[in-house]
Amino acid sequence: MRVFRVGQVLRGLAHRACTPKCVTARRRESGMTLIETVIALAVLGMIAVAFLTGLATLAKLTVTNDVRTTAESLALSQLEWAKKASYVYEAAGYSPAPLPGGQDYSGYSALVTAAPLRSPDDGIQRITVTIKRLDKGIVSLEGYKVDR
């Protein structure tokens, strides 16, 4: 008794049922070629690079917006602090308010300058608040202080 494996039987049937053209066509359609695989990988690679570039840009923008928002908040509070301080005629500046502690505010500094609108000082000063982070100017805000 002769034992046949399933693969041998199927191959034998395929060879009997197909002409040489049929066998050649089956070989062409039997699976993905190396070129198709390389092209598919290249397309997937380009998509992955574009996606990762977008994520990196988004992360940078998030950090930049966070720094700017923090600086604007500090500038507003510094301007209000300077407006509430007692008026000093011919002042070149006012001492800034203490900055909040914590990790979110590390590296920030404030500078509050003043200049009278007219000379001699008639009771109106232009207050300029500059907020820096790591010695780089982030926000500059102007307001007016009046002697009441």
Image (tube, rainbow, N blue to C red):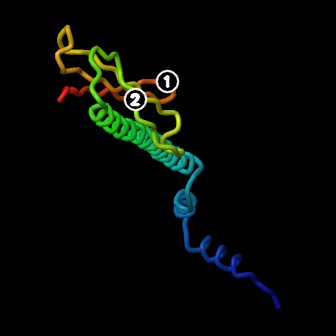
Q: Can residue 74 be seen in this view?
A: yes
* Residue 40 image position (x, y, % from top left): 51, 50
Decide which of 122, 48 is in the foreground and name it.
122
Using residue 13 as the reference point, say whether residue 89 is left or right of it. left
Q: Residue 95 carries which label?
A: none
Question: Image point 36% across, 24% down: which residue?
Answer: 94
Say above or below: 85 vs 6.
above
Decide which of 86, 23 is in the foreground and name it.
86
* Residue 73 image position (x, y, % from top left): 34, 40
Say above or below: 45 vs 127.
below
Decide which of 35, 16 is in the foreground and name it.
35
Residue identifier under label 1? 135
Residue identifier under label 2? 131
Say above or below: 106 vs 135.
below
Question: Image point 29% across, 21% down: which residue?
Answer: 88
Question: Image point 18% across, 21% down: which residue?
Answer: 124
* Residue 76 image position (x, y, % from top left): 31, 37
Question: Image point 34% across, 36% down: which residue?
Answer: 72
Look at the numbered disc 1 and give the secondary structure of its residue. loop
Using residue 124 as the reference point, say whether residue 62 is left or right of it. right
